[in-house]
């Protein structure tokens, strides 16, 4: 489906791949962002677009000489990793529960962190720059080291999946943990403070921004890049542990060579060239999809997920959706669904089936098939996956 240009009477046009009319609050949020003076060319909305803080989740915002920290959000560098293994579905027979329990024992979830710091973690080059980060996080280095290689909570997950050829894939979703959140909060506060000092009339306080060439902009950009690096490596550490578990259960511990590896952010910002100009591109719940990029678009637990290759669509700033997108808030999901609904909707998946994960029930998300149909001009599907094991954060 090609995009439609929304009639929002804004300074910059808003192009939408959602395939439906935006709700009142969603339209207001899109209008607020597209009215900012430094927004470049247009704002692009992905098929999974839904309400966020300041800016819509599922939006791609290109800016000139400015950046909005709250548009990237507090889970800096949140994203996905996946590997295609050489193993077949039959090798999983009778082992699903055992594998799930081992994943939960080896990779900390929720608020838990690692009891000891692994050598792969201490070897990460990023620790050398920790001293240069915002002074407000100076006491968090130990916590950040212990949390690297941990999943976190909410919609973060680890999955073992099968593709249409019954090949085993490993997939996970996580970000920059507490340290990314702490950095984001401090810079968002600074941006809001500057807007207040300047008595600037913003359409939403969460759209407070930093201007290129200022010390505040430089400090945020440095910390942002560091947190994005942390998030990427956090996924590498977890994927390595997950791979070792699978090797033990399916190949007697013999190391395997992945047939394909993907590791991509979907909450981040980078400098990129679009329409012949170098701009800052913020992807808030969106994946980069140039022709050379592989991406991961997960459905909810119990639904299909997709490994994709970008088509380099210029109008989307070479981007695509980052998942199915929420249909209802976590609280609404808890009120709308029962434990029986969860058990029914996750039939055939080895996962937790308790009240603690009802807010992640498939019914709380948009139908992934529709999301994929709406972005046929953004990506091509490389593999269609169905999870057989799901570990929730």
Image (cartoon, rainbow, N blue to C red):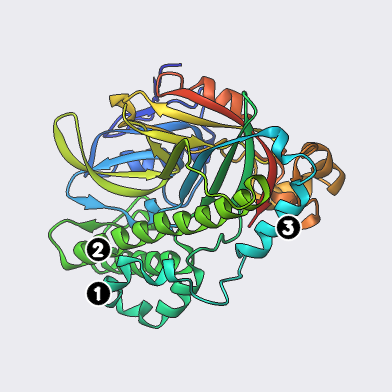
Residue situated in front as seen by the camera: 250 or 229 = 250
Q: Secondary structure at mark 1?
A: helix
Label total for image: 3
**Residue 48 location, x and y as percent?**
52, 34
Q: Does 320 appear above or below 98?
A: above
Q: Does 112 appear above or below 355?
A: below
Task: Of the two numbered discs 3 and 2 on the same chain, state the one appearing first in sequence.
Answer: 3
- Report the residue marked by disc 2: 222
Q: CA distance from mark 3 to mark 2?
A: 38 Å
- Report the residue marked by disc 1: 132
**Residue 225 location, x and y as percent?**
29, 58
Task: Of the two numbered discs 3 and 1 on the same chain, state the one appearing first in sequence.
Answer: 3
- Report the residue marked by disc 3: 101
Task: Of the two numbered discs 2 and 1 on the same chain, state the one appearing first in sequence.
Answer: 1
Label 3 or label 2, whichever lies nearer to me, is 3
Q: CA distance from mark 3 to mark 1?
A: 39 Å
Q: Secondary structure at mark 3?
A: helix
Q: How many other residues sit within 10 Å of disc 3, few (<14), some (14-19) or many (≥20)?
A: few
Q: Residue furthest top?
A: 1
The quadrant in which residue 58 appears is top left
């Amino acid at each position: 489906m090609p995009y439609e240009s929304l009639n929002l009477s804004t300074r910059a046009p808003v192009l939408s791949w959602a395939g439906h009319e935006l709700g009142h609050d969603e339209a207001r949020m899109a209008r607020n962002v597209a009215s900012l003076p430094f927004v470049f060319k247009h704002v692009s909305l992905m098929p999974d677009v839904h309400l966020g803080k300041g800016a819509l989740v599922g939006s791609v915002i290109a800016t000139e000489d400015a950046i909005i920290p709250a548009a990237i959000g507090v889970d800096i560098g949140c994203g996905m990793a996946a590997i295609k293994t050489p193993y077949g579905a039959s090798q999983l027979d009778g082992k699903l529960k055992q594998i799930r329990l081992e994943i939960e024992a080896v990779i900390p979830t929720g608020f838990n962190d690692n009891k000891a710091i692994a050598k792969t973690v201490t070897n990460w080059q990023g620790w050398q720059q920790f001293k240069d980060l915002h002074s407000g996080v100076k006491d968090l280095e130990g916590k950040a080291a212990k949390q690297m290689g941990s999943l976190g909570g909410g919609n973060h997950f680890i999955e073992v999946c099968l593709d249409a050829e019954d090949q085993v894939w490993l997939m996970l979703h996580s970000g920059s943990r507490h340290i990314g959140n702490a950095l984001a909060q401090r810079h968002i506060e600074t941006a809001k403070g500057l807007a207040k000092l300047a008595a600037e009339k913003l359409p939403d306080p969460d759209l407070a921004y930093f201007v290129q060439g200022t010390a505040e902009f430089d400090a945020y950009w440095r910390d942002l890049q560091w947190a994005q690096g942390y998030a990427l490596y956090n996924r590498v550490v977890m994927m390595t542990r997950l791979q070792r578990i699978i090797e033990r259960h399916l190949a007697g511990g013999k190391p395997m060579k992945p047939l394909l590896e993907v590791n991509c952010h979907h909450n981040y910002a980078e400098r990129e060239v679009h329409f012949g100009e170098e701009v800052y591109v913020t992807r808030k719940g969106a994946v980069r999809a140039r022709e050379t990029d592989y991406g991961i678009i997960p459905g909810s637990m119990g639904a299909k997920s997709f490994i994709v290759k970008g088509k380099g669509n210029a109008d989307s700033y070479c981007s695509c959706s980052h998942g199915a997108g929420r249909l209802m808030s976590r609280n609404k999901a808890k009120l709308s669904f029962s434990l029986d609904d969860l058990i029914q909707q996750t039939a055939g998946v080895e996962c937790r089936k308790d009240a603690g994960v009802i807010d992640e029930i498939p019914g709380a998300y948009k139908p992934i098939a529709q999301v994929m149909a709406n972005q046929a001009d953004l990506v091509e599907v490389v593999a269609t996956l169905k999870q057989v094991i799901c570990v929730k954060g």
